[in-house]
Image (spheres, helix red, strand yellow):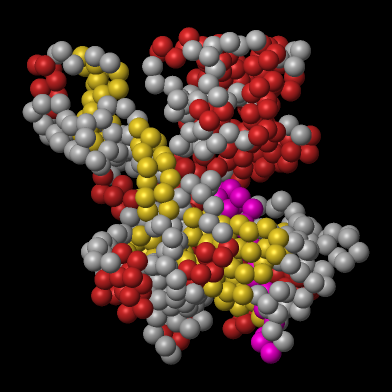
């Protein structure tokens, strides 16, 4: 940090962070000449009160520099912010130029820079899709990560656990996460050229035989995208109850929900009408006109799904052309981590993950912006009268930015590549569950929740930590980082840091209790002692609550109470919210934050909402997916 260290050469401890700033207290320019306000003035609606450590550092800076007015503090705050950003960006540029031969200053965004670096490294040309109908078809083949909560509450039962019951089966809760899931998917054979519809006349079985002969992991040659009708045999419903194959975008309707789930909604939301929304669901329904990459279809057929009809086929030329780029960045990241070069380590991770996002970037929602003075009524009237007029951001004094939808959209992203990467990421997760974990435990394991690259499950028998050493199917996929023998020596770990291998999120500490209420809303009570101990007590408590800020803590007791059927306490918090358009056409639009008032800037607003919720419309009922039929 060249700039910061030069500024704080005498007091290097001042480099650790910016000084406190009274955001909510500052309302007029006249306050710049006032004395520095007391500690209470530095409490903000967004961040809350200042910590003791931060305030002590603030007072040390005030004393050292002799600040007398708020203006002194303000100028220093901005100077430190600018110098810190200069140091970070300079470090980023130097690392990128040295290791990649490209200057990120010539790119608008980090993902855009990563895309350039990937193309430079691989020297791979990617075909555009020139047929509009084909673009729409491939947009329908893109399905994101799977996030679903299946079982509401699970308590592990092992000797020494706080709630151990000797009359119940021994159970353990395991939470594993794939090492760089999308990076692993990008090392497989992927499409890049000669994308065309294949109208060859084949029977369903002939198409499946052709597809089954293809190596979608490391092979080169032709690969296929299919549009098929799939049958989910009834005899698989119980076996696949926790984690159904072939997720689909679907809009669950009120009458599809179990009576229990309808009652939960009524208890939580009263008379508020249920609004169906489209989401990615894991269901046991048969699938019609399902668009799928051949490598994903291979797995589904191998696991028992039946292809009833093939509607359309698109062929392409594929090879593992991204593999060298991913592996190079992975190796450089591990090297940087070992050497303590944090900036380069983070850069290398970004260089892989952001490439995946660029493969299916949504260009349809891009806007064309116009900067117009508010006094130019004639131009303003013409602009706001256009049917493509979208809205305005009035936050620049006597002028405004106005947004219009584009009349034409250039579809220049290789979305077929993104569809294949997403498909192979699902192959990795489904294969881990159905071809490694389930064969070892059969009906003694159940999936509690899944979130794109992670699986949390409960296994009977109490032998997980031994099985990962003794069972080849588990040994093949588990990264045992953190696992140790009672004498303290680590487990042998050939999978350490290997892409796509599954690492225990809480190792070496076992999970005592787990609750999953809905997608991305789960908590884990983790033991204080490692798994080889004789007795255990509650240690860390971790949770994920989508839609609520991380600083808002909901304790274990409330999670337990809600799981038992008690109503969750409502929560309130403050957040930044931008104005939005509520009227268009004719005159300039009115901007509103939902309170019926005009606004021209971002505002700090108070949000009041439910805290925890048991309503989960991604499943039929607790532990039962849509389409389940008992066999």
Name the residue at 58% across, 53% down: 181
On screen, residue 217 versus residue 162, left or right, reads left
**Residue 405, position as x, y percentages in the image:** 22, 33
Name the residue at 79% across, 34% down: 339
Name the residue at 63% across, 59% down: 541
**Residue 365, position as x, y percentages in the image:** 30, 38
On screen, residue 227 versus residue 555, left or right, reads left
Considering only vertical position in the picture, is 388 above or below 194?
above
Which corner quadrant holds the N terminus? Answer: top right
| Nearer-the-camera pick, 350 or 332 | 350
| Nearer-the-camera pick, 493 or 119 | 493
Residue 428 seen: no
**Residue 144, position as x, y percentages in the image:** 43, 55
Q: Which residues are magenta?
A: 167-194
Does the magenta segment cover residue 189? yes
Considering only vertical position in the picture, is 298 above or below 496?
below
Residue 250 seen: yes
Considering only vertical position in the picture, is 420 above or below 625?
above
Which corner quadrant holds the C terminus? Answer: bottom left
> For residue 580, what is the image quadrant?
top left
On screen, residue 393 versus residue 413, left or right, reads left
Does the magenta segment cover residue 159? no
| Nearer-the-camera pick, 536 or 179 | 536
**Residue 4, position as x, y percentages in the image:** 67, 16
> For residue 275, what is the image quadrant?
bottom left
> For residue 590, what is the image quadrant?
top left
Q: Residue furthest right?
A: 487
On screen, residue 163 versus residue 10, left or right, reads left
Name the residue at 74% across, 61% down: 528
């Amino acid at each position: 940090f060249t700039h910061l260290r030069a500024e704080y050469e005498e007091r290097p401890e001042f480099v650790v962070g910016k000084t406190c700033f009274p955001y909510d207290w500052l309302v007029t320019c006249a306050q710049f000449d006032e004395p520095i306000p007391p500690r209470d003035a530095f409490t903000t609606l967004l961040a809350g009160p200042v910590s003791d450590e931060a305030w002590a550092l603030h007072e040390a800076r005030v004393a050292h520099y002799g600040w007398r007015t708020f203006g002194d503090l303000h100028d220093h705050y901005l100077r430190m912010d600018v110098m810190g950003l200069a140091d970070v960006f300079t470090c980023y540029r130097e690392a990128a130029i040295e290791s990649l031969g490209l200057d990120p200053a010539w790119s608008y965004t980090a993902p855009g820079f990563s895309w350039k670096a990937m193309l430079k490294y691989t020297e791979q040309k990617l075909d555009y899709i020139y047929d509009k109908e084909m673009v729409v078809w491939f947009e329908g083949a893109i399905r994101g990560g799977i996030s679903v909560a299946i079982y509401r509450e699970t308590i592990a039962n092992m000797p020494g656990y706080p709630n151990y019951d000797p009359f119940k089966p021994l159970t353990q809760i395991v939470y594993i996460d794939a090492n760089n899931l999308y990076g692993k998917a990008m090392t497989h054979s992927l499409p890049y050229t000669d994308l065309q519809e294949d109208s060859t006349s084949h029977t369903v079985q002939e198409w499946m035989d052709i597809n089954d002969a293809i190596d979608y992991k490391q092979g080169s040659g032709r690969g296929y995208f299919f549009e098929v009708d799939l049958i989910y045999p009834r005899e698989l419903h119980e076996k696949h109850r926790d984690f159904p194959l072939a997720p689909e975008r679907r809009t669950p309707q009120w009458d599809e929900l179990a009576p229990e789930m309808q009652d939960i909604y009524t208890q939580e939301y009263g008379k508020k009408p249920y609004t169906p929304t489209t989401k990615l669901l894991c269901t046991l329904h048969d699938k019609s006109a399902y668009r799928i990459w051949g490598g994903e279809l291979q797995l589904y057929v191998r696991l028992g799904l039946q292809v009833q009809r093939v509607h359309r086929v698109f062929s392409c030329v594929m090879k593992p052309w991204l593999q060298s780029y991913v592996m190079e960045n992975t190796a450089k990241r591990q090297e940087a981590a070992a050497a303590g070069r944090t900036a380069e380590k983070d850069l290398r991770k970004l260089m892989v993950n952001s490439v995946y996002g660029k493969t299916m970037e949504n260009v349809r929602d891009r806007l064309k912006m116009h900067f117009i003075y508010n006094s130019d009524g004639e131009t303003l009237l013409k602009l706001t009268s256009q049917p493509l007029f979208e809205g305005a951001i009035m936050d620049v004094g006597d002028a405004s930015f106005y947004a219009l939808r584009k009349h034409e959209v250039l579809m220049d992203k290789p979305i077929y590549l993104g569809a294949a990467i997403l498909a192979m990421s699902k192959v990795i997760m489904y294969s881990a569950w159905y071809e490694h974990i389930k064969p070892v435990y059969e009906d003694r394991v159940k999936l509690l929740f899944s979130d794109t690259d992670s699986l949390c499950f409960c296994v009977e028998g109490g032998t997980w930590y031994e099985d990962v050493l003794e069972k080849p199917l588990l040994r093949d996929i588990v990264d045992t980082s953190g696992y140790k023998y009672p004498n303290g020596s680590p487990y042998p770990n050939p999978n350490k840091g290997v892409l796509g291998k599954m690492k225990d999120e809480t190792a070496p500490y076992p999970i005592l209790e787990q609750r999953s209420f809905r997608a991305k809303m789960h908590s884990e009570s983790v033991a204080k002692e490692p798994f080889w101990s004789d007795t255990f007590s509650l240690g860390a408590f971790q949770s994920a609550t989508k839609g609520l800020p991380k600083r808002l803590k909901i304790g274990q007791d409330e999670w337990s109470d809600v799981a038992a059927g008690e109503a969750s306490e409502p929560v309130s918090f403050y957040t930044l919210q931008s104005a939005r358009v509520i009227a268009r056409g004719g005159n300039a639009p009115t901007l509103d934050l939902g309170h019926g008032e005009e606004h021209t800037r971002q505002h700090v607003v108070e949000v009041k909402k439910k805290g925890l919720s048991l309503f989960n419309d991604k499943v039929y009922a607790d532990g039962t997916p849509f389409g389940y039929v008992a066999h």
